[in-house]
Image (spheres, grey):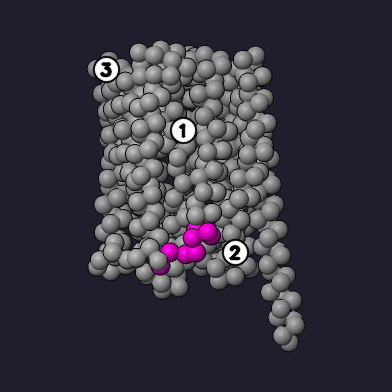
Amino acid sequence: MPFKQLISAWRSDDLLRKVVKNSSYLFSSSSLGIFFNLISSVYATRALDVAGYGVLGGITTFTAVADKLFSFRIGELVIKYAGAALANHEKERAAAVFKMAALTELGVSLLSYLFILLTAPLAALYFAKDASLAPFFIFYALIIPAGFVYETSSALLQISGHFRSQAALNLAQSIITAAMIVYAFFSQAGLGMVLTAYLAGKVILGFGYASLALWRAHQLFGPGWWRVSFQHLPPAREFWTFAFSSNFSGSVNLLVRDSDILWINSLAGLEQGGYYKLAMAIIGYMLIPVDPFIKTSFPEITRAVAEKAWGRLKNLLRRLTLLSGAITASFGLALLILGGPFIFTYIYEPKFLPALIPALILFIGYGVANTFFWNRPLILALGKPTYPLLVTASLGLGKIALSFYLVPRYGMNAQAALMSAYFVFSIGIIVWRGLREINVQSREILHSTEDTL
């Protein structure tokens, strides 16, 4: 039945076909990328062993957390305001938004890297259990200035429908990273070479996206777009409230969702962190096929809200959920059946088998997140940027408090259970609020039409 519904939806919904068509470019790249990402993951585990893989997780996770600590999730702001401006043929406003976002992201990137320079010794001591590893933290953190306008650039390419170039860059970085990690394994180069491989991939993405976005900005906004006055920006209070709410939301996420490996390394040890990092890597393969839909559906959701096309929006959300749910269920079934006898026998080494249990637990929460991936884009498009922040912050505080109590006693499985519960409840509440708002708006239009008649 679901398959027949998908076929029927595909034939009858032009908007769904547009989203899927745009997603297909990224999906093709992601499909090939899964293969190269798997190679990277497998050979990284073999090059570093369990504890070393935990150290790698500490370094990469701390860098991501530090980056997001100051990040404004600026891409969401560009999609909402520049996308709406372009839809209304307001090129000067769109150019002003893009320019402000790029300058903001550049400044934030430099601030984030400075933070890591100052805190690397403490981070190495607590999250890698060895203060002498601080130079590795500083070295890998170069990914932050390398991706100086990555979010801004990616957002502009999304709203302008430029997806094939993104797919090509994503695939290129996956291939180069995998090749360098394989070299690290066979040459026994160790942690430094593995970090260099990941850094090289991020440099390709950072500079590649920036170059494409500048070229695309010239096409969209015209020559001299960078001289557009900031007076064309949306009202300051609305604009910066959205930006700062996204920043606070990102800060909450980094403490609640993105820093699990740091908590485990610190509270339960590097081996537990290594297993958990692998569990997260396995779950990451489930997210890859759906991720392109996040990038391609957000602009369409924003456009539908701006046009108050509530019926079209509800149909799109329903069918996207059916599609992502089918992908998620297929992955879960494969993980359950093949996890022990195949994945940890023929792909990863048997000594990493303890990672299977947290992977299965994480599947529950990430499965919900994957199926309802549109929850945050919808609530942002509806002009409710603070609502996800309130939900995630309130539930996240409870998760963190329980982590300090449960993880030292029950290790990575407790952390996985807390993460899944957090996703189920937070996303459930946000989805409920978004759909409720759509129904309210639909009824208002209906009543307005009836009053007019």
Amino acid on which the number 3 mark rests in the picture: Ala
Question: How far across and down, in percent of the image, does residue 389 sit?
Answer: 60, 45
Residue denoted by label 1: 65
Above or below residue 417? Residue 317 is below
Residue name at image x 27 percent, y 15 percent: 188
Secondary element under disc 3, as helix, strand or loop, is: loop
Q: Earlier in the sequence, mark 1 or mark 3?
A: 1
Secondary element under disc 1, as helix, strand or loop, is: helix
Amino acid on which the number 2 mark rests in the picture: Leu
Residue denoted by label 3: 189
As rendered, which of 373 and 335 lies closer to the eye? 373
Mark number displayed over residue 364: none
Question: How far across and down, in percent of the image, does residue 85 sit?
Answer: 44, 68
Above or below residue 186? Residue 418 is below
As rendered, which of 198 and 77 lies closer to the eye? 77
Secondary element under disc 2, as helix, strand or loop, is: helix
Report which quarter residue 172 is drawn in.
Answer: top left
Per the image, is 73 magenta?
Answer: no
Which stretch appears magenta? Answer: 232-239
Amino acid on which the number 1 mark rests in the picture: Val
Q: Can I make out residue 173 in this image? A: no
Residue denoted by label 2: 313
